Image: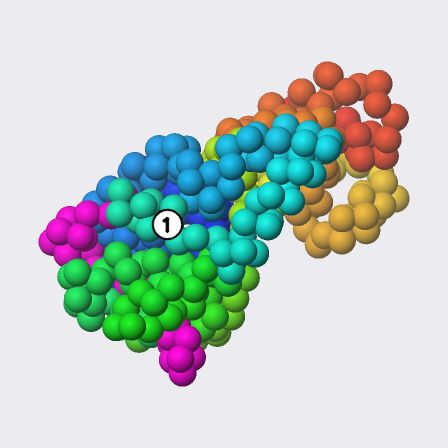
């Protein structure tokens, strides 16, 4: 049995939308999905059989409605208009939140109501679980769908998402609840304890308690190597970026592709040894020490990615290492820098 665990982390959850598309393409099917906070909402969509729709859902989320900010304020933030109008709008939105003792849950409730079909979720063969914490006694709950009353499933999803930024409301059985991250931000153990033999964990670097799991457990971790933005990210461009990042990061893991921040088709270690044969030893040592690497493969990839980031190569494609080296040699031949010079000396014709 295969399980999927989705970390909490607010708007960073858009990363998981892209990750799920990569799972679909690689024909990996899940018997259960468990999530914390936004991971619970994403997980409920997946467990309902609608995971392929997650990128569309995320790209169409109205952030002003979810967080209760004015559309003018969000527009000013995204345009980085740090003027008097921006300051005034910031003050008004902050004042409104303080008066209401947090962001009203209305927008989040509407999002959950609109995206989750309880019948679809309950009738699906994919099990679903979430984490939340009851405020009264700080009691944590690992709940699968069989443990939840049908009429309260949406309330439990909202309870799992109750970050302190939201206004406290009694949700279930006249109790207040806290975001599941206060107990377990990435519910791997929930699946392992249920008997799942393999678990994929999609991390989004959410704030919360990261519970350890058995080192011998078959857990495959997928996580971003670059920033996903803030937990309350207001820029739709960031959401789109996160979706693409999640897709390529997951594809890299599932297909065992090469690369760190970029994605490359796989080449064996001996390929990298051969292309480094003509590099003077002192130059190679300098590069190796600069990147603190051990193998020729690590050293070459780190050096190439350094240049790719400097020259703003597109992150979202699968590269062939030879073509990238040739491009660097041709287009940046006049760059006099020790890393550029190292790449220019790599021997790709053999």
- Whether residue 243 is situated above or below residue 214 in the rendered picture: above
Magenta span contains residue 80? no
Q: Nearer the viewer, residue 33 or 281?
A: 33
Identify the residue at image location x=79%, y=30%: 340
Return the x and y of residue 164 as percentages of the image width and height.
50, 63
- Whether residue 26 is situated above or below residue 203 in the rendered picture: above
Numbered range of the magenta stretch: 115-140
Give the side of residue 256 with respect to residue 275, left or right: left
Q: Nearer the viewer, residue 174 or 75?
A: 174
Identify the residue at image location x=32%, y=45%: 110
Give the side of residue 240 with respect to residue 49, left or right: right
**Is residue 339 visible to us here?**
yes
Callout 1: SS: helix
Return the x and y of residue 35 as percentages of the image width and height.
36, 59
Mark 1, residue position:
106
**Is residue 269 visible to us here?**
no
Name, please, the residue furthest toward the front.
99
Magenta span contains residue 135? yes
Identify the residue at image location x=67%, y=21%: 326
- Whether residue 252 is situated above or below residue 217 in the rendered picture: above
Name, please, the residue furthest toward the bottom.
137
């Amino acid at each position: 049995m295969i399980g999927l665990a989705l970390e909490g982390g607010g708007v960073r959850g858009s990363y998981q939308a892209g990750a799920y598309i990569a799972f679909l393409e690689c024909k990996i099917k899940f018997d259960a999905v468990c999530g914390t906070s936004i991971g619970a909402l994403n997980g409920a969509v997946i467990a309902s059989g609608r995971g392929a729709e997650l990128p569309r859902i995320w790209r169409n989320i109205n952030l002003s409605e979810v967080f209760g900010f004015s559309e003018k304020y969000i527009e000013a933030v995204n345009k980085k208009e740090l003027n008097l109008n921006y300051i005034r709008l910031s003050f008004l939105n902050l004042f409104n939140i303080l008066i209401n003792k947090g962001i009203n849950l209305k927008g989040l409730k509407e999002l959950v109501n609109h995206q989750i079909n309880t019948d679809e979720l309950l009738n699906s063969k994919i099990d679903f679980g979430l984490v939340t914490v009851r405020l009264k006694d700080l009691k944590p709950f690992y709940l699968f769908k069989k443990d939840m009353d049908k009429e309260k499933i949406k309330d439990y999803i909202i309870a799992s998402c109750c970050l302190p930024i939201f206004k406290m409301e009694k949700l279930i059985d006249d109790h207040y609840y806290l975001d599941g991250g206060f107990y377990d931000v990435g519910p791997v153990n929930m699946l392992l304890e249920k008997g799942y033999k393999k678990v994929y964990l999609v991390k989004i670097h959410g704030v919360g308690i990261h519970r350890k799991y058995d080192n011998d457990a078959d857990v495959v971790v997928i996580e971003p190597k670059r920033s996903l933005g803030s937990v309350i990210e207001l820029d739709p461009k960031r959401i789109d970026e996160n979706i693409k990042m999640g897709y390529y990061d997951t594809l890299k893991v599932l297909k065992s592709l090469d690369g760190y921040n970029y994605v490359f088709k796989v080449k064996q270690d001996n390929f990298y040894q051969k292309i480094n044969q003509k590099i003077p030893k002192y130059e190679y040592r300098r590069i190796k020490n600069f990147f603190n690497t051990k193998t020729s493969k690590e050293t070459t990839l780190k050096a190439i990615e350094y240049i790719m980031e400097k020259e703003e190569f597109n992150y979202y494609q699968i590269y062939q290492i030879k073509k990238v080296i040739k491009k660097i040699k041709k287009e940046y031949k006049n760059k006099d820098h020790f890393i550029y010079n190292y790449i220019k000396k790599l021997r790709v014709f053999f």
